[in-house]
Image: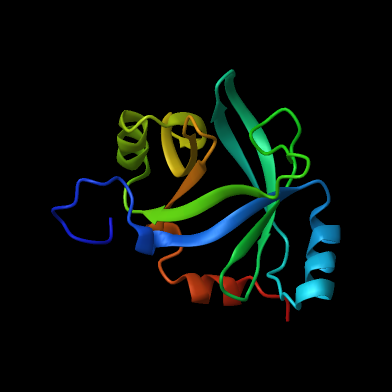
Amino acid sequence: MSGSPTTTRPLSATDLYHTGVVVPDLEASKSALTEIAGYRWTATMSAELPIRLPDGERVLTLRFAYSLDAPYVELVQEIPGTPWTAAPKSATHHLGYFCDDVPTTAERLQAAGFVLEACAVIDGAPSIFAYLLDPSGVRIEIVDRARMPDFSAYLRSKTPH
């Protein structure tokens, strides 16, 4: 993780890179935020992944887009019956942090009182990202930094031309 090698914290505040919002209609939300605030967006991305949920593993199709303007907003298409369910009158869904080791960081957050809500699974192990929820309702997404080592370049590569 970033920060001091002697830190005992599972996360570093400097690794916060986006605020995630789950919405019932991704394209409509992109348009509305563009209209009212001038946001520019990446193309809508889609990934079909095996996801571990409290009731077992399922393959889900995640659809999302990032703002090109900082502070970065990630809009995620709602998937009813999963942690990606839009909460009425509550916009913020999660805070997204980069980390260097998803399984270890997830374990450290669980030791700090968070509950693992969902994670991508590769070869039976948590990978790519994980969502963890603390008892007060703060949801953290941890994302493998190696997937997007240069976030600005990643965003540019996903921008419609």
Q: Where is residue 60 in the image (x, y as percent from the top left)?
A: 67, 36
Foreground residue, 17 or 101?
17
> What residue lies at 53% left-to-right and 70% top-to-bottom?
154
> What residue lies at 72% left-to-right and 67% top-to-bottom?
43
> What residue lies at 32% left-to-right and 47% top-to-bottom?
101
Foreground residue, 46 or 123?
46
> What residue lies at 48% left-to-right and 70% top-to-bottom?
151
Quadrant containing the C terminus in the rendered view: bottom right
When the figure is inspected, residue 57 is found, relative to residue 21, above or below; the finding is above
Foreground residue, 59 or 109?
109
When the figure is inspected, residue 58 is found, relative to residue 161, above or below; the finding is above
Quadrant containing the N terminus in the rendered view: bottom left
- Label total for image: 0
Is residue 17 rendered to the left or right of residue 94?
left
Q: Position of residue 17 (x, y in %)?
A: 48, 63
Is residue 40 rendered to the left or right of residue 68?
right
Is residue 74 rendered to the left or right of residue 87?
left
Foreground residue, 22 or 60?
22
Q: Position of residue 125 (x, y in %)?
A: 40, 32
